[in-house]
Image (tube, helix red, strand yellow):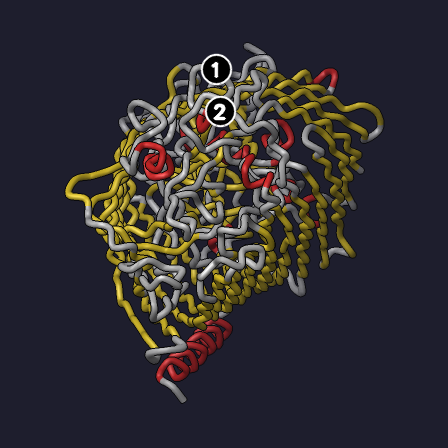
């Protein structure tokens, strides 16, 4: 047996032993899907009030939690499922007070409830608050959204638009989500990771947003339980049959611009008091699957509008751009005893896409397609040990396949194909203990991945004059990661909260090359985490800071180049090479303040990430050497010497007033790198001696939104505004052939122009469960370039005005 197999076998035995020990000491609810809430109840003069009934009511659900305040006015809820809640305090001689709070995974949220007046003086007062304003304990930077935003933000039912609207530094570039200038985003479903070491590939959302009960996005101050992804973590808590006491469901039909149509249906309910189910399926088709390239990648002005054609919108957004998706999801819960809970979550999708063409490529009938297949299964067993001790066990599997297939192209171009298959298997065990001033979590996680990527280049049968020799790279790769972590949130005093944590990651990978024998690499890394929150006096002002030194395991794709690279018949020029990518190591920090001002909830923070061996991806150019990209979605991983991303974020949420709510956010962001390629796909380019902008470096972005609820009529109206200052213009190599080989950008400052969009939606409940929504995205119909081609991104333009009509029936 090989050393790698022995290591895998020992890891399995280690995990089994941990599970056995955990079973012996009596385990509980998974802490990654739960949090804690504490606080105080005060009278109008600021004195503690004992014996107050405090009720925690989920906004999406029917299970209430109740506590009584002690003699110091304190109350404490332990290990509550994460989500949004109404928190209500009731006492004789006082008007009830209500606050809206969000509970985030693995953290204790602290709020203060102050009775506004004695009973009978004024009508009931409603106070709306979120952890971003009232939480005095958290040092992380987090945001959240729920099904209300998804149903009201234009386009959010099918995409991550709700996440983009509620998270400051988040946008789409190169068809992938970027947070804080990076794309190493981690995803969880019900607190369990959906592992993926790749940096690129599938463009389908890993879960249909309609299944979301609550989603939390952590962008700074990552706890020790989070590994493998350093840009941020998106944790989606799904809907469940236990959300309501009776059976429920919905059906939605939607249609709109660009031949877009979808149908979705969901059904949830209980069988007795111990079993619950929730199943949902969505089918979607559209004539506009990708953000397409401009029709003409040229420096001419064929449209006679005063700018180069490469900056113009395409003649049509639907040319060779069809998409169809089928995406099922299901979750099953079983309660064998009052202390135990077993959950099985199943998800996946099947998407077929056409890769869009330029005008010239369409004339040549170029035909590239992308096929995406994905499925994940998470099995979790939970058991309540006591009111302050929790343990959970979970096993999971994730399968992902992305195939880019060249079927037809211009005669002078060779054809290419890329097919990546990955299987991830893993398990974890976690203990959570909440006692006194401490919220402690400790856990271990082991997972392995088997990956094979087949990359082929072969002569175009339409071009008998082609001399390109056939090429195939198919290197099986395997990796194993073992992790252990410990973290503690310490309520040091009334004003100080300290979060301490550490994570140890052991990683090894093996590449079974066809020629030259096997290659291997291994890492051992300890990641410290520190967070501090200080409450200023008795106010709702909190100063916070966090620091972490993070480890990002490398992608294990491997391209085995031909021995004849550089020859007249080789698809690859001389100087090209490939070495296994290295792990990225990041130093990160946030410093900021959260406060409440006249009901407005404000967060201002500055952040920085320094990334050694920065992981990015390179896109294959056309092998003819003209600089034109052979495929808009064929990528290979690379390490750059160092990356540096930093910026400032401001987030404001207005108090709700007569059905009107509003929010706004601003982000200043820098995403830069220095040096050259030190791992992955090498092209022999000299290193840069100074910092240069990465392709996802957008300096300024603004998001603002408002919703008006006309509850009396069961109607709403939502408007969303977005502004971006533009990404770098990386078209210099693309346009160089038109300028005698001299790199020349399409814009004067090599920076794409700024852009803004306004979108809105309106909806109304119609009759006995029937409802309708009308969505307008990009009302002004302005189309702008998102990226212009380089080896790091490709060329994409934004969507024009899109109109969608949705009809739904809830029961």
Q: In this view, does 440 lie above or below 20?
A: above
Q: Tags 2 and 1 in contact by the CB under 8 Å rule?
A: yes
Whole-percent x, y for residue 294 in the image: 50, 31
Q: In this view, does 295 lie above or below 479?
A: above
Q: Say which of 459 and 435 sits in front.
A: 459
Q: Which of 327 and 70 is in front in this view?
A: 327
Q: Whole-percent x and y of residue 791?
A: 37, 45
| CA–CA distance in space, label 2 to label 1 | 9 Å
Whether residue 495 can be seen here:
no
| Dot 2 alpha-carbon crowd within 10 angstroms: few under 14, some 14 to 19, many 20 or more | many
Q: Nearer the viewer, residue 376 or 70?
A: 376
Badge nearest the viewer, 2 or 1:
1
Q: Residue at x 42, y 71 (%)?
A: 477
Question: Please, what secondary structure does the residue beneath circle 2 have?
Answer: loop
Q: Name the residue under label 1.
A: 305
**Quadrant (top left, top right, bottom left, bottom right) of the N terminus:** bottom left
In this view, the residue in front, 384 or 460, is: 460
Which residue, given by chain and number where applicable, does mark 2 sit on? 312
Rendered residue at 52%/26% (across/down): 313
Q: Which residue lies furthest to the right in this view?
A: 768
Residue 122, quarter of picture: top right
Q: Is mark 1 on a helix, strand or loop?
A: loop
């Amino acid at each position: 047996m090989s050393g790698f197999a022995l290591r895998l076998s020992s890891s399995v035995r280690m995990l089994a032993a941990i599970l056995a020990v955990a079973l012996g000491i009596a385990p509980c609810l998974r802490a990654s899907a739960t949090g804690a809430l504490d606080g105080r109840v005060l009278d109008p003069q600021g004195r503690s009030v004992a014996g107050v009934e405090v009720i925690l009511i989920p906004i999406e659900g029917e299970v209430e939690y109740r506590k009584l305040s002690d003699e110091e006015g304190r109350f404490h809820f332990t290990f509550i499922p994460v989500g949004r809640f109404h928190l209500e305090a009731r006492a004789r001689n006082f008007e009830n007070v209500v606050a809206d709070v969000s509970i985030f995974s693995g953290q204790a949220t602290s709020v203060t409830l102050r009775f506004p007046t004695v009973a009978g003086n004024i009508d009931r007062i409603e106070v709306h608050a979120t952890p971003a304003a009232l939480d005095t304990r958290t040092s992380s930077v987090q945001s959240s959204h729920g099904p209300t935003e998804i149903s009201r933000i234009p386009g959010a039912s099918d995409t991550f638009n709700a996440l983009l609207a509620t998270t400051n530094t988040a946008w789409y570039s190169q068809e992938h989500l970027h947070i804080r200038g990076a794309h190493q985003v981690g995803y969880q479903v019900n607190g369990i990771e959906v592992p993926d070491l790749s940096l690129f590939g599938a463009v389908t959302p890993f879960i249909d947003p309609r299944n979301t009960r609550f989603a939390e996005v952590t962008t700074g101050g990552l706890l020790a339980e989070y590994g493998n992804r350093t840009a941020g973590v998106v944790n989606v808590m799904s809907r469940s049959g236990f959300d309501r006491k009776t059976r429920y469901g919905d059906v939605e039909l939607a249609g709109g611009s660009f031949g877009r149509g979808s149908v979705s249906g969901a059904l949830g309910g209980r069988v007795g008091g111990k079993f619950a189910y929730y199943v949902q399926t969505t089918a979607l088709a559209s004539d506009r699957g990708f953000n397409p390239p401009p029709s003409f990648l040229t420096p001419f002005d064929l449209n006679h509008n005063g700018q180069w054609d490469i900056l113009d919108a395409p003649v049509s957004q639907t040319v060779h751009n069809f998409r169809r998706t089928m995406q099922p999801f299901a979750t099953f819960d079983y309660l064998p005893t009052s202390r135990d809970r077993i959950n099985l979550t199943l998800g996946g999708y099947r998407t077929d896409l056409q890769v869009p063409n330029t005008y010239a490529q369409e004339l040549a009938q170029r035909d590239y397609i992308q096929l995406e297949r994905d499925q994940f299964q998470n099995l979790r067993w939970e058991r309540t040990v006591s009111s302050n001790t929790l343990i959970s066990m979970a096993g999971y599997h994730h399968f992902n396949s992305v195939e880019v297939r060249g079927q037809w192209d211009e005669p002078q171009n060779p054809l290419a194909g890329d097919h990546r298959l990955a299987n991830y298997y893993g398990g974890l065990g976690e203990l959570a203990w909440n006692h006194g001033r401490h919220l402690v979590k400790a856990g271990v996680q082991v997972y392995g991945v088997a990956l094979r990527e087949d990359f082929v280049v072969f002569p175009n049968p339409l071009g008998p004059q082609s001399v390109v020799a056939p090429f195939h790279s198919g290197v099986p790769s395997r990796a194993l990661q073992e992790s252990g972590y410990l973290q503690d949130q310490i309520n040091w005093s009334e004003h100080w909260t300290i979060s301490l944590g550490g994570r140890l990651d052991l990683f090894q990978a093996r590449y079974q090359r066809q020629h030259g024998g096997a290659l291997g690499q291994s890492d051992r890394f300890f990641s410290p985490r520190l967070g501090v929150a200080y409450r200023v006096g008795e106010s709702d002002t909190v100063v916070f800071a966090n620091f972490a030194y993070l480890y990002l395991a490398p992608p294990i794709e491997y391209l085995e180049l031909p021995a004849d690279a550089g020859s007249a018949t080789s698809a690859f020029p001389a100087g090209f090479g490939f070495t296994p990518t290295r792990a990225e190591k990041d130093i990160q920090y946030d410093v900021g303040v959260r406060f409440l001002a006249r009901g407005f909830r404000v967060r201002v923070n500055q952040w920085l990430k320094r990334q050694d061996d920065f992981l990015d991806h390179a896109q294959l150019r056309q092998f003819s050497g003209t600089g034109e990209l052979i495929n808009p979605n064929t990528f290979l991983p690379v390490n750059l010497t160092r990356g540096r991303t930093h910026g400032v974020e401001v987030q404001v949420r207005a108090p709700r007033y007569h059905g009107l709510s509003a929010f706004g956010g601003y982000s200043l962001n820098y995403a830069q790198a220095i040096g050259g390629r030190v791992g992955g796909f090498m092209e022999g380019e000299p290193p840069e001696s100074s910092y240069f902008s990465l392709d996802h470096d957008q300096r300024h972005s603004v998001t603002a939104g408002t919703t008006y609820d006309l509850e009396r009529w069961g109607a709403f109206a939502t408007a969303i505004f977005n502004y971006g200052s533009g990404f770098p213009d990386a078209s210099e190599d693309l346009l160089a052939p038109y300028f005698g080989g001299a790199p020349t950008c399409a814009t004067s400052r090599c920076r794409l122009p700024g852009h803004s969009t306004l979108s809105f939606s309106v909806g109304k409940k119609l009759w006995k469960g029937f409802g309708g929504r009308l969505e307008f995205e990009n009302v002004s119909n302005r189309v702008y370039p998102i990226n212009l081609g380089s080896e790091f991104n490709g060329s994409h333009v934004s969507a024009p005005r899109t109109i969608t009509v949705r009809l739904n029936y809830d029961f």
